Amino acid sequence: MSMNHNELIASLIHIDGVSAEEIRALLVPPKDLSFADLALPCFRFAKALRKSPVEIANALAQEISADLPPFLLSCTALNGYLNFKFARDDMAKETLLKVCEQGDDYGKSDLGAGKTICIDYSSVNIAKPFHIGHLSSTVIGGALSRVFKALGYRVIGINHLGDWGTQFGKMIVAYKKWGDPAEVETGGVKALHKLYVKFHQEAEKDESLNDLGRAYFKKIEDGDPEALNLFSRFKEISLAEANRVYDRLGITFESYNGESFYNDKMQPVLDLLAAKGLLVDSEGAKVVEVGEDMPPCLLVRSDGATLYATRDLAAAYYRKNTYDFEKCLYVVAYQQNLHFRQVFKVIELLGEPWAKDLEHVAFGMVSLADGTMSSRQGKVVYLEDVLNSAVTKAREIIETKSPDLEDKDAVAEQVGVGAVIFGALQNNRIKDITFSYDKVLNFDGETCPYVQYTHARATSILEKAGAFDPQKADFASLENAHELISAIASFGDAIKAAADKREPSIVTRLAIDTAELFNKYYIDNRILNADEGTKEARLLLTAAVKQTLKNALALLGITAPNKM
Ligand code: ARG
């Protein structure tokens, strides 16, 4: 494979003690594209060379300019930065041919080959509604899984199911007292949740129900067949429902080991803590002191019960031993900041060098702009209902915009679900978001339908053009598409940055920028009836836009319809 511009530049610069790989990693896009296509800050070399960054940049610029390689238009220095301008037709040719040659693989690399990343995400709670609160974890985790896979990592996506706790004893009590098997069969989690709500109402009046709930939970723990049976049934019902949602979101997991999986895996960790003198008694409970700035981490209650944190400790060891991860990411809301700081600290105190590889990938809250959509059962908003509403609304828009479209239902599914996913991934993940159907389904905004629509437009242009000969392309005619070509060329870097920062919004941003630049280009430049050479170049550009948008959306779990 030929070297790309970044690699070529890295190979031009020789500094003792700095590898070409390091130089590549330092290259940044310039703030202003009219100024340069790529920049290298020279601050990092100041120490090694015992010179100021300004002196270093000036010297390098002079050296490289004296013997300018053909792919560069210029190399200049400014304020300690080296600025490179590429020969534009050369860059256009390299980029567009590469996209078309690599197709669905464009953007992928093998940077992560041989490395394993565990991603704990979605991690829904059994017998509880799969509600909008789990949207972000699910789609951020799904996107990160695909992003890391695209970089060649082995990814272990883990759905750390919330399938343990006294609530399951309560569920059994409610089911036995008021449950109707047929209703639960058809009503699924909604019916189960209704029973759970009923249990709490009744327990307000009759305190003894809580004791009964605890007794039934004990039965599950002790392996009582009837209790275990019901517990497994609840779990099946919940998972069947969750899987329906996962299918629509294009999500699969490598593991469904949830909290109950660690029942027999906590004691060794507790023993280890005790042996190291880290487990201390506190009013009958067992805790680990995790420093001045945090409350102690509670691991065993005075009645002997283990906790969420105990299970996470066992899970971390299990994952390290089973998968030998480079990193283990936990895609969980920022409300659990303290929990993860405590758990990670305990592992650090245990002296495990891999404690530093555990990372909480936190995100903000999702709330709804229109409060009217809360479901009948109360304030819970089911994710499946949100997807359904988005699809229904997308269907209406399509009906008015493209009444003659075939497969309207299939397209509405892709547009509606895509809009929800994209909307949840669009901002910096730590930001709280207010979800609105109108906003995410606006065909003219910075939205998924806008990107999908641009993809369909590119498809239609290519279809109208029919077969063409890329050999005839005159790349010099793409001078005014430089910004668009730069966006396409930076796709691989965007994937890498999204992985490094655990930030899928970098991919959504690239998709929007590419779509906007293409639409602008399309208004100003005829494609189908341009002169020979120019036409082929513009068609090649159109094909590259289509492919880049398709690949970017695919990373997010979104399909791009060819017509809409
Ligand atoms: N089930 C938990 C919740 O819904 C999230 C679990 C996150 N993962 C973990 N290993 N703690 O809040």
Image (cartoon, grey):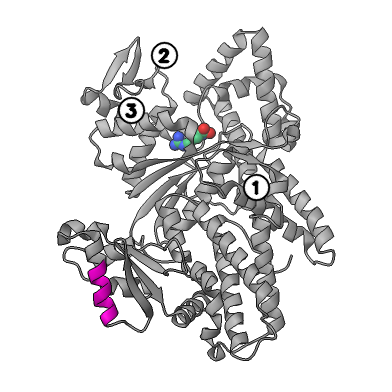
Residue ID at (33%, 23%)? 293
Q: Inspect the magenta stretch and tell me whether residue 547 lies in it.
A: no
Residue 317 screen position, x and y as percent = 33, 38
Residue ID at (56%, 43%)? 136
Q: Which residues are magenta?
A: 58-66
Indicate whether 505 appears above or below 234. below
Residue ID at (37%, 20%)? 300
Disc with the residue nearer the chain's start (2 vs 3):
3
Classify the position of the N terminus by image quarter.
bottom left
Q: Which residue is mark 2?
A: 303
Residue 83 screen position, x and y as percent = 35, 68
Indicate whether 274 appears above or below 61. above
Dot 1 amino acid type: Arg
Q: Which mark is residue 267?
A: 3
Classify the position of the C terminus by image quarter.
bottom right
Q: Secondary structure at mark 3?
A: helix
